Image (tube, rainbow, N blue to C red):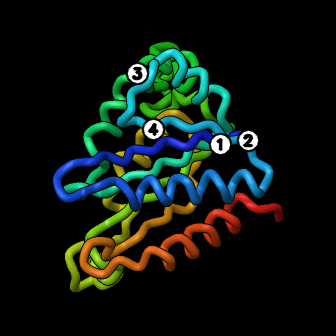
C-alpha cells in the first residue's frame, strides 16, 4: 500500500510537538516494516502545493498526525487542507456532485478518491473517560464525533475512513510507552496482512 503521512504537529504554547513527531515516526517505522511505501510531509516545515497534489494522487491512504487544540486540529492542518485540497479539483473531486441534468445526484457525491482511505491519529489533554462516559464533557460521543468535519471533508472526496487512534491525558498523565505500544498494535491491525 502507498501511505502518505501528514504530520500536523506544531510547536505552540505549551506544545513542544515531540509526542506527535514520535507517533509520526512510529507510524513510519511500523508501516515500513509491514512493507508499505511511505511518503511524508511535515506541514509546519512548509510544502509545495503541486508536490502535495502529486503525493495525494500517489497515495492509497493518508494518515494524519496532530494534537487536538480547542476541540479541533491545529490551524496549520486546516490551512494545509484549504490550500492543497482546493487545488485537488479533478484529482480528489469533480465539484460537489450535483447536476442540472440529473437531479438524483446529490451534494457530496462528486468525490474522485473512492479508492483511497484515511486515518486520524490525534493527541489529547482530555482523558479517555471524557469521551466514553455520557456524564463527561464529550457525552460518550467519542473522538470521531469531535472530528466530524474532517470525516465529512474526506467523505466529500469519496474516501473511506479507517479506525482512528488517539492518545489521551497526554499533559497530566503521559504514558508515552503505552501510547507507542498501542499505536504500533493499531497500525499492525489496520495495515498488517490479513
Q: Which residue is most to the right?
A: 194
Image quadrant for the C terminus? bottom right
Q: Is residue 113 left or right of residue 82?
A: right
Q: Residue 177: where, in percent of width, then height?
A: 50, 77
**Judging from the image, what secondary structure is the residue with disc 1 in?**
strand
Q: Position of residue 173 (x, y in %)?
A: 30, 81
Instruction: Residue at 45%, 19% (x, y): give it.
Output: 49
- Classify mark 2: helix, strand or loop: strand
Q: Give the residue at x 56% y 16%.
A: 90
User: In terms of secondary structure, where does tag 4 sit?
Assistant: strand
The location of residue 69, given as percent across then percent down, is: 24, 55
- Which labelled disc corresponds to residue 42? 4
Question: N-terminal of the two: label 2 or label 4?
Answer: 2
**Who is closer to the viewer here, 105 or 39?**
39
Query: Of the residues under marks 3 and 4, which one precedes in the sequence?
Result: 4
Q: Which is more foreground, mark 3 or mark 4?
A: 4
Of pointers 3 and 2, the one earlier in the residue sequence: 2
Which residue was labeled with disc 2? 37
Q: Residues within 10 Å of mark 4 (few under 14, many from 20)?
A: some
Instruction: Please tell me how crowded label 2 is: few (under 14), some (14-19), or many (20+) other residues with Cα within 10 Å.
Output: some
How far from the left and from the top, in percent, is residue 39? 62, 37
> Viewer-nearest of labels 4 and 1?
4
Q: Which residue is mark 3?
A: 86
Question: Camera-side residue: 136 or 75?
Answer: 75
Of label 4 and label 1, which has the lower sequence position?
1
Asked if marks 2 and 1 touch (Cβ < 8 Å), the reply is yes
- Give the residue pinned by disc 1: 3
Q: Mark 3 and mark 1: span between their CA atoms?
A: 21 Å
User: Which disc is residue 163 wearing?
Assistant: none
Query: Toward which corner of the image does residue 132 lie, by quadrant?
Result: bottom left
Left or right of 7 on screen, residue 34: right
Amino acid at each position: 500500500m502507498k501511505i502518505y503521512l501528514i504530520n500536523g504537529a506544531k510547536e505552540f504554547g505549551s506544545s513542544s510537538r515531540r509526542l506527535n513527531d514520535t507517533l509520526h515516526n512510529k507510524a513510519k517505522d511500523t508501516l515500513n516494516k509491514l512493507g508499505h511505501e511511505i511518503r511524508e510531509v511535515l506541514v509546519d516545515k512548509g510544502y509545495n502545493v503541486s508536490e502535495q497534489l502529486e503525493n495525494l494522487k500517489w497515495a492509497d491512504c493518508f494518515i494524519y498526525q496532530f494534537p487536538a487544540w480547542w476541540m479541533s486540529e491545529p490551524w496549520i492542518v486546516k490551512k494545509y487542507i484549504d490550500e492543497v485540497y482546493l487545488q485537488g479539483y479533478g484529482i480528489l473531486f469533480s465539484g460537489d456532485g450535483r447536476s442540472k441534468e440529473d437531479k438524483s445526484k446529490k451534494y457530496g457525491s462528486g468525490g474522485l478518491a473512492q479508492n483511497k482511505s484515511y486515518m486520524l491519529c490525534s493527541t489529547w489533554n482530555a482523558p479517555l473517560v471524557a469521551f466514553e462516559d455520557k456524564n463527561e464533557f464529550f457525552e460518550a460521543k467519542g473522538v470521531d464525533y469531535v472530528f466530524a468535519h474532517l470525516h465529512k471533508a474526506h467523505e466529500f472526496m469519496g474516501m473511506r475512513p479507517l479506525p482512528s487512534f488517539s492518545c489521551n491525558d497526554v499533559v497530566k498523565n503521559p504514558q508515552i510507552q503505552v501510547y507507542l505500544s498501542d499505536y504500533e498494535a493499531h497500525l499492525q491491525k489496520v495495515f498488517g496482512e490479513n
